[in-house]
Image (spheres, rainbow, N blue to C red):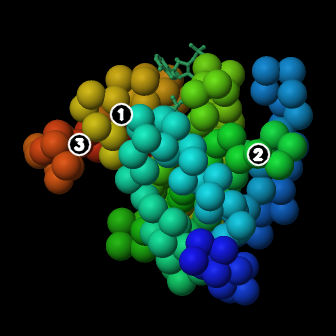
């Protein structure tokens, strides 16, 4: 059953069209990592990262990633790999209505955290937004996610709103943040 799903996934082209991201190498913890556009064959790795960072629970399951990668345009999903293992990813969504680049998801495998990999992904998001003429990066984070909030603060994001009881699983507040790329 799973194999069948996997084979079917590989037949579908990736739909992301945000920018032509050729892929690049970068260094973290003395190792060379590759950052490239995610494909459907990365989905098991994307789910595994979420399970690792959220105590076995993956907020986005395989079919969510599959839909995002194959059906949705104006997306850019990037994966960081060490050899063949996906160790981090970022999901970027261009939102036409508000004319910003939204960080819909970002995660780094626990053993790779604290090595500036998340920062590299955020900096890449800044560069992508500038390349396509967007003036703002945006995101939401759980009030309790102090590590993520510290990362965003470190990169100059500011709080613009608190959406009370935003998350349906535990009714936690969402902190909305933006980064002005013009100043
Ligand atoms: C949040 C996350 C992506 C950060 O990635 P990372 O690669 O560990 O972050 P970096 O190493 O680039 O951190 C850069 C800076 O951000 C801040 N920071 C990042 N994580 C932090 C933490 N847990 N506690 C305090 N500060 C933190 C620090 O200022 C850090 O600088 P320093 O290393 O000089 O202290 C990672 O912890 C993660 O995947 N968390 C689980 C998934 C998640 O919560 N995603 C966000 C959803 S909104």
Q: Residue at x 71, y 67 (%)?
A: 41
Q: Which residue is mark 1?
A: 158
Q: Which residue is mark 2?
A: 85
Tell me: residue 65, above or below residue 104: below
Q: Is residue 11 visible?
A: yes
Residue 137 x %, y %: 47, 50
Crowding around mark 3 (Cα neighbors within 10 Å: few <14, some 14 to 19, many 20+) is: many
Nearer the viewer's eye, disc 1 or disc 3? 3
Residue 141 falls in image quadrant: top left
Q: Residue at x 23, y 42 (%)?
A: 174
Tell me: residue 37, above or below residue 116: below
Left or right position of 9 against 28: left
Q: Residue at x 52, y 37 (%)?
A: 52
Crowding around mark 2 (Cα neighbors within 10 Å: few <14, some 14 to 19, many 20+) is: few
Residue 117 x %, y %: 67, 32
Which quarter shows the N terminus? bottom right
Q: CA distance from mark 1 to mark 2?
A: 33 Å
Which is more toward the observer, 172 or 176? Answer: 172
Q: Which residue is mark 3?
A: 174
Tell me: residue 105, above or below residue 72: above
Lower position in the chain sequence, tag 2 or tag 3: 2
Residue 60 falls in image quadrant: bottom left
Label 2 sits on a secondary structure element that is strand
Label 3 sits on a secondary structure element that is strand
Which is more toward the observer, 110 or 151? Answer: 110
Q: Residue at x 70, y 80 (%)?
A: 7
Q: CA distance from mark 1 to mark 3?
A: 13 Å
Q: CA distance from mark 2 to mark 3?
A: 31 Å
């Amino acid at each position: 059953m799973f194999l069948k799903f996997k084979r079917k996934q590989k037949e579908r082209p990736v739909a992301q069209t945000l920018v032509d991201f050729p892929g690049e190498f970068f260094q973290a913890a003395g190792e060379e990592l590759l950052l490239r556009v995610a494909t459907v064959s990365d989905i098991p790795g994307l789910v595994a990262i979420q399970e690792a960072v959220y105590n076995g629970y993956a907020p986005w399951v395989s079919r969510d990633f599959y839909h995002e990668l194959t059906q949705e345009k104006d997306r850019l999903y990037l994966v960081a790999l060490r050899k063949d293992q996906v160790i981090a990813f970022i999901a970027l969504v261009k939102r036409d209505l508000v004319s910003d680049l939204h960080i819909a998801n970002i995660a780094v495998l626990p053993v790779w955290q604290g090595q500036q990999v998340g920062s590299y992904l955020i900096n890449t998001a800044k560069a992508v937004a500038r390349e396509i003429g967007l003036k703002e990066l945006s995101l939401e984070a759980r009030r309790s996610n102090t590590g993520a909030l510290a990362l965003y603060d470190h990169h100059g994001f500011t709080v613009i709103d608190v959406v009370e009881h935003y998350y349906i699983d535990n009714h936690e507040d969402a902190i909305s943040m933006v980064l002005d790329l013009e100043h």
